[in-house]
Amino acid sequence: LVNDDFEKPVNALDKIPQNNQPPITVTHLAFEIMIAIGSVMMATGIIYFIALWKKKRWFNKKWFLNLFIVSTPLGFIAVEAGWTVTEVGRQPWIIHGIMRTSEAVTPMPGIHYSFYLFTAVYFTLSIAVVFLLYRQIKMVPQLYDR
Amino acid sequence: MLYIVIAFLFLAIVLYFLLGGADFGAGIIELFTSETNKSRTRKTMYQAIGPIWEANHMWLIIAVVIMFVGFPVIYSQMCTYLHIPMLIMLLGITARGTAFAFRSYDAVKDERTQNFYNHVFVYSSFVTPLFLGIIAGSAISRQIDPHAASFMQAYIFSWLNYFSVAVGLFTVALSGYLAAIYLIGEADDDNDARRFIGKARIMNIAAVIFGGMVFLAAELEDIRLAHFIFGNPVSLVAVIAASISLVLLWVMIYKGKKRIIRIFAGFQVTMILLAVGYMHFPYFVMVKGGDNLSLMTLHAPPKTIEDLGWGLFIGSFLILPSLFYLYYSFQKKGDDV
């Protein structure tokens, strides 16, 4: 698969020297989270179609509606988990086999402050999104239900 | 092929200054509008830039990608020594975009949050072009010092100097000027149009003052800007052409021609960039000690440049027509209402 060839074996971690291995626990857990959420979402989709064809009365059931509320953030979490797999899993390389991440860092001292700054920016934006969505939902009766 | 890539790079930079600059300028105009007229200005401005404001940042992205793919050494040098102003500019773009979007899409339009969005929008509209100009100024200021001994020398004074800051202020004034000229044609009535003409005049005067400061700062810091600009024929012609079109522009304004003046204003800014770009070519970044970074030598391997050139060439066939259509359809919609 990696080599565009179904016959050729894919190198496992035991073939990769210790110092070129990515952090295994994080990659592994993130991958499992992604797969688990993917399966749950697939199951949710199937349940929806079952309801659509055979069990119309489920549409008024509380557990059924709650299922979709719970599913809302799952897609985002799966995407983030998958992203974690690729980004952590590629370490220690920034360009595989050519350049290490440690060699690619901007040489300016104090670069970690940039990191804190951007973390804060993302955090603020996340808060803002939650705040705005909350307001949006709160306004639904006035904006759409008239 | 290298020349095609360089041509696209300059095109992207010029268009970013023109379109993105006018975009920032709208916020600057709002910042310097009196409280009573603010909401009217905001309305015109929102109609004018609302649908296209995100498209303008495409040019910055194209310029960055060309630098990143085609001239990685120059790119990494700039990102290292100008890390801080680039960071601030990036934050400015982010804050501006989010405030602009939130202000129109927030479900609850209460005064307090709207005010907050307005504040974030106008101040980031000022800060972003300021730092864009500072970065541009630093690139030609010869203050970037690869052999600097201290943090301050290497990462602060590379951009915090009279020349770079003067270029930054000049950029702010030019942005405001472009936006005011653009808004004259968008105004709903004569009263608004007169107000924007007033703004254009103030911004024009500011641009002349800050432009003078750029030359003054250049003298102070021993950057032979005047010598270079007036020493080569292309830059000299560009500067003269810009000056003539400035006079024509004000004649046109008083004759009530509201659309054609945009072309003149755009032409002036293009000429200024041409004058500065040409006098340094092939150098893109001027470095202390004279190891200037040249576009002709520090490019990626020929194969990369070739692919990049083709990519840009083919891409422009897809992007340019759709972009023109975007501006056209928007302009048409503006005429109907």
Image (tube, coloured by chain):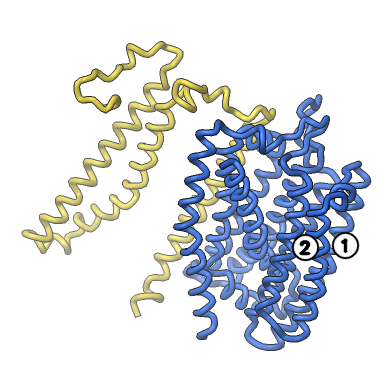
| A115 and B275: which is toward the camera | B275
Which chain contains the residue that carries disc 2?
Answer: B
Q: Secondary structure at mark 1?
A: helix
Task: Determine if marks 1 and 2 fall on one subunit.
Answer: yes
- Residue A42's label in the rendered image is none
Which chain contains the residue that carries disc 1?
Answer: B
Expressed as whole percent of the image width and height from the top left, the position of residue B97 reads 57, 59
User: Height in image: B311 above or below A107?
Assistant: below
User: Height in image: B161 above or below B193?
Assistant: above
Q: Quadrant of the C terminus of chain A?
A: bottom left
Q: Is residue A127 left or right of residue B145?
A: left
| B236 and A71: which is toward the camera | B236
The residue located at (81%, 59%) in the rendering is: B237
Q: Estimate how packed mark 2 is, as few (under 14), some (14 to 19) or many (20 or more) residues with alpha carbons within 10 Å.
A: many
Proximity of marks 1 and 2: CB atoms separated by less than 8 Å: yes
According to the picture, the residue beneath numbered tag 2 turns out to be: B173
Which quarter of the picture shows residue A90? top left
| B19 and B271: which is toward the camera | B271
Q: Amino acid at mark 2?
A: Ala
Q: CA distance from mark 1 to mark 2?
A: 9 Å
According to the picture, the residue beneath numbered tag 1 turns out to be: B209
How many badges with numbers are in the image? 2
Q: Amino acid at mark 1?
A: Ile
Q: Chain B's colour?
A: blue
The chain letter of the yellow chain reads: A
Expressed as whole percent of the image width and height from the top left, the position of residue B285 reads 73, 39
